[in-house]
Amino acid sequence: MVQDFFFGEDMMLRRHDYSVNIVGGIPAAQLTSTYIEADGIRLPSMRRAYARGPDRRAVTDMLLVSIDFSAVAFT
């Protein structure tokens, strides 16, 4: 229910922290990168969600979800 969003100096989303409720509330850190543009809107085309350790850092050897977008269009 609580989510944290972290933005870079360019105001682009870099990280999204949340709990994965469908698997028992595992704390996750979703890292975003490789921005693309679709109809004037910039979107992160790569997202990697990792388990989050007690220090709130992403545990990069515990990948939960990997999402890649290559072609985006709004209709």
Image (cartoon, rainbow, N blue to C red):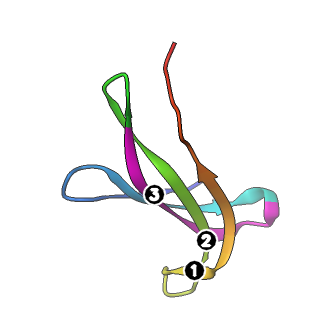
Q: Quadrant of residue 5?
A: bottom left
Q: Looking at the rendered structure, which numbered label has been put on residue 60? A: 1
> What is the x, y in percent for residue 59?
58, 82
Residue 29 sits inside the magenta stretch: yes
Q: Amino acid at mark 2?
A: Tyr
Q: Amino acid at mark 1?
A: Thr
Residue hosting label 3: 32
Of residues 36 and 4, the one drawn nearer to the viewer in this rendering: 36
Asked which secondary structure carries label 1, the reply is strand
Secondary structure of the residue carrying tag 3 is strand
Q: Looking at numbered disc 3 in the image, what kind of residue is underneath it?
A: Thr
Q: Is 73 displayed left or right of 43 in the figure?
A: right
Residue furthest to the right in view is 23
Reading the image, the residue beneath label 2 is 50
Tag 2 and tag 1, C-beta contact below 8 Å: yes
- Residues under labels 2 and 1: Cα distance? 6 Å
Image x and y of residue 23, in percent: 80, 64
Q: Tell me the magenta residue range.
A: 23-36
Q: Residue at x 72, y 66 (%)?
A: 25
Identity of the residue drawn at 53% across and 33% down: 71
**Left or right: where does residue 67 sit relative to residue 38?**
right
Secondary structure at numbered mark 2 = strand
Residue 20 at what x, y percent from top left? 69, 61
